[in-house]
Image (cartoon, helix red, strand yellow):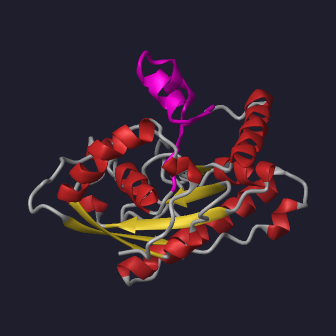
Amino acid sequence: MPPRRRASPEKRRPSVFWAAACIVVPLTGLIAKIEITGAEHLPEYGAYVLAPNHYSEFDPVIVAVATWRLGRAPRFMAKESLFRVPVLGALLRATGMIPVARAATASAAKQTIVQAEQLAEDGRGVIVYPEGSLTRDPGLWPMRGKTGAVRLALAGDLPVIPMATWGVQRILPRYGKLSLWPPRKRVRVVLGPAVDLDAFRTGPRTNTNLVAATDAVMADIGDLLAGLRNEPAPAERWDPAVHGQKETGRLESES
C-alpha cells in the first residue's frame, strides 16, 4: 500500500467525487488489487498533469481510483463532444473535467492556454493520456504520443508526472471482453518523478519542440512500464501512420 498521505483540500471538500468514490472504489476493489508505488511523486497540493499509458478501456478506472487513493481528485481531459451529451455533459462539468478539441486550430490552442491558467489558479490536477487512444502497439507498449499533454503543461508551467499501469489487460483486454474471475486481479501502478521539460519551457513552442517534449514524456512512461514488466521497452515507439493504422477507433484486426 502507498504511504498514508493527507488528502488535498480538493478531496476533503464535499463534491460529486465523494458520491462517485463511494460506488466506484469498493466495486473496483472487488475486481482489482491495486498496488501503488512512487506515490511521493504525485504532488499533494497544486496543479499537475498526470500522464499514464493506455492499453485497456478499463485502465481509466484504475488510474482514477489510484489517484483518489493518493489524495487527489481524478479529473480527465475528455473529448469536447462528450460535453454536449445531455446529463453526461453536466456530470463532466460538475466534476471539473476538461474538454479537449481534436483539431489543432488557433482556437484550440487558445483554449489550452485558458485551461492551463485555470488549473494553475485552482491548484487542480488533470489526467491526460498522451497517446490519445488505446495503443496500437502489438505488445501493448506505449505508442507515439501526441502533444496535448505537454502543450497544457508548458502553457501553465505545470509538472508532468509519468505513470504506468500493468495488469489491467487481464481484466479487460484491448477491445476484448470483461473478465471478472478470478476476482481481485493484481494491477500494479507506478508513478515517476516529474519529466524534465526545462529545455522546452523557455524555448519557442514550435511543433518540433513540442514533439521532442512529448517524446521525453513517452520515454519516461516507457521506462516505468519496462520496470513493471521486467523487460526492455522497444527501441522505437509504434507509429500507427507507418503501419497504415487509424489512430482512433477499433483496430480492424481486433474488431
Measuring from the top left, give residue 144's x and y in whole percent.
Answer: 57, 58
Q: Is residue 106 above or below residue 172?
A: above
Q: Which residues are magenta?
A: 72-101
Could one spot residue 38 in this view of the protein? yes
Quadrant where the C terminus lies?
top left
Measuring from the top left, give residue 251's x and y in whole percent.
Answer: 36, 44
**Is residue 45 within the magenta segment?**
no
**Of residues 30 and 132, the one drawn nearer to the viewer in this rendering:** 30
Direction from residue 187 to residue 11 in the image, left or right? right
Q: How many marks?
A: 0
Say which quarter of the image contains residue 77.
top right
Say which quarter of the image contains residue 47.
bottom right
Quadrant where the N terminus lies?
bottom left
Q: Residue at 36% of width from left, 61% of height from top?
A: 138
**Is residue 75 within the magenta segment?**
yes
Q: Is residue 26 above or below residue 188?
A: above
Q: Residue at 36% of width from left, 78% of height from top?
A: 229
Query: What residue occupies the far left of the structure in this picture?
Result: 181
Query: What residue occupies the far top of the structure in this picture?
Result: 86
Measuring from the top left, give residue 57's x and y in whole percent.
Answer: 34, 47
Q: Is residue 212 above or below residue 192?
A: above
Q: Residue at 35% of width from left, 38% of height from top?
A: 19
Q: Residue at 44% of width from left, 72% of height from top?
A: 4
**Of residues 29 and 138, the one drawn nearer to the viewer in this rendering:** 29
**Of residues 228 and 21, the one drawn nearer to the viewer in this rendering:** 21
Could one spot residue 144 in this view of the protein? no
Measuring from the top left, give residue 89's x and y in whole percent.
Answer: 48, 23
